Image (cartoon, rainbow, N blue to C red):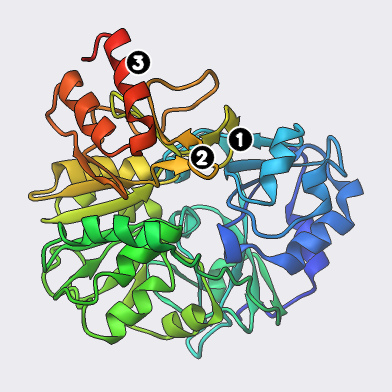
Amino acid sequence: MPSLPEPTVADAVLDHIGRGADLIVPIANGEPPTLLDAIERHAGRLDGVRVHQMHALRDRPYLHGAFPGRLRHVSYFLSHVTRPRFAEGQVDLVPNHFSEVYPLLRHRCSDPLVIAAVSPPDRHGYLSLGTGADYTASFIGRARFFVEANERMPRTFGRNQLHLSQVAGWVRSDLPLVEVAPVAPQAVDRRIAAFVAERIPDGATIQAGIGAIPNAILASLAGHRALGIHTELLSDGVIDLIESGVVTGVRKRNNRTKTVGTFVLGTQRLYDFVADNPAVELWPATYVNDPRRIATEPNFVSINATVEVDLTGQCASETIAGRYWSSSGGQADFARGAMYSEGGQAFIVCRSTADEGRISKIVPSFAPGTIVTTLKNTVDKVVTEWGVAELRGRSLRERAVALIAVAHPDHRDRLAHEAKRMGYL
């Protein structure tokens, strides 16, 4: 039998990176720090290399333009690290739906090299992509891999494994994962959560985004039964629901009895929870986020936050004051899939105001530079602490009335005035 590759030194990754190369890096903790350190250390040898990644967690010199013409970051979702660098022109941003990142990369990159952090090889020689599957798992068997086996990366299940025989090279490391603590919900977030929770039936399959309000909603589901999870992000909020028996997945049509996500981001408690846990599966975003797959799941419930909503129901979730903050992610994927699910519901949640009540999140129309993330034709329910605006199938007049009713009372008269001026009322 052919011998399996032995671990090597990080600098060896440079032997696999040619002129104009495209490097694919997984989302969040899937990033291989030791390999990227080596690549930056030898950046003088590079020419026109692009690093493609969603949601980088670690700041690096190349993100600041330290190696012009040699190494450049191409983002598919801005993070706290890449956001200011994009504003400075040092980082590119590609518009996308998360479900389509893999095909976009396949179209753009002719011979990519995937560099990824993975779990250590098991006794069979298999590695897992650990905290993710995202777009990276779709490249298994279709692209070259050079990986960093991190002793602290949890071994996970799903469609995110590859064998040592499939890698061009690998190194060992022992580095802590980046932890992201859950945002503590406030009273206003718990009011929003209560409106959503009372509309979720037992047996529903849930997708919840990130942030204080989704966290509050997950916490408010403790009295439910036989829920399933099919979500982009697995966060700390799912642990208690699974351990208490609220989430069992027994009524799911897809991956029955399994909690399914495409990446994991949270605290060490979460990373320990998913490690060697056969009840949790990580699948590629081409599967998890595919609206056609989501639509086959009865009573699918998607829950996503937004920045502001206009009176037609359009949701702007990726820009603030006309400047890019993040990207589309999977919000439209899940809202669209829930729309076609039998009994499905898609909740868009936000507080009614910002800046201590001075700014309304419900607006007559968007300011220049604002990007629409979820179309008015797709948006189902908009929830603030003042109630639920049911928009699916409603006329423009009905939508305006419903949205004004869930705006903060201090802003309703102005919104009604603008709605009349615009011909909605």
User: What secondary structure is marked by label 2?
Assistant: loop
On the image, the x and y values in percent for residue 40 come to: 84, 55
- Left or right: residue 212 compared with residue 392: right
The amino acid type, in three-letter code, at marker 1 is: Leu
Disc number placed over residue 122 in the picture, else none? none
The amino acid type, in three-letter code, at marker 3 is: Glu
Disc number placed over residue 418 in the picture, else none? 3
Residue underneath mark 1: 93
Q: Residue at x 16, y 61 (%)?
A: 198
- Badge 2: residue crowd in 10 Å (few <14, some 14–19, many ≥20): many
Q: Does residue 97 appear in the picture of this structure?
A: yes
The amino acid type, in three-letter code, at marker 2 is: Ser
Mark 1 or mark 2, whichever is nearer to me: 2
Residue lying furthest bottom = 123
On the image, the x and y values in percent for residue 33 come to: 72, 66
For marks 2 and 3, the one nearer the N-term is 2
On the image, the x and y values in percent for residue 35 come to: 74, 64
On screen, residue 307 above or below 122: above
Residue underneath mark 2: 327
- Left or right: residue 401 compared with residue 95: left
Total marks placed: 3
**Distance CA(mark 1)–CA(mark 3):** 34 Å
- Badge 3: residue crowd in 10 Å (few <14, some 14–19, many ≥20): some
> Depth check: 30 or 202 in front?
202
For marks 1 and 2, the one nearer the N-term is 1
Residue lying furthest left = 342
> Depth check: 115 or 77 in front?
77
On screen, residue 280 above or below 30: below
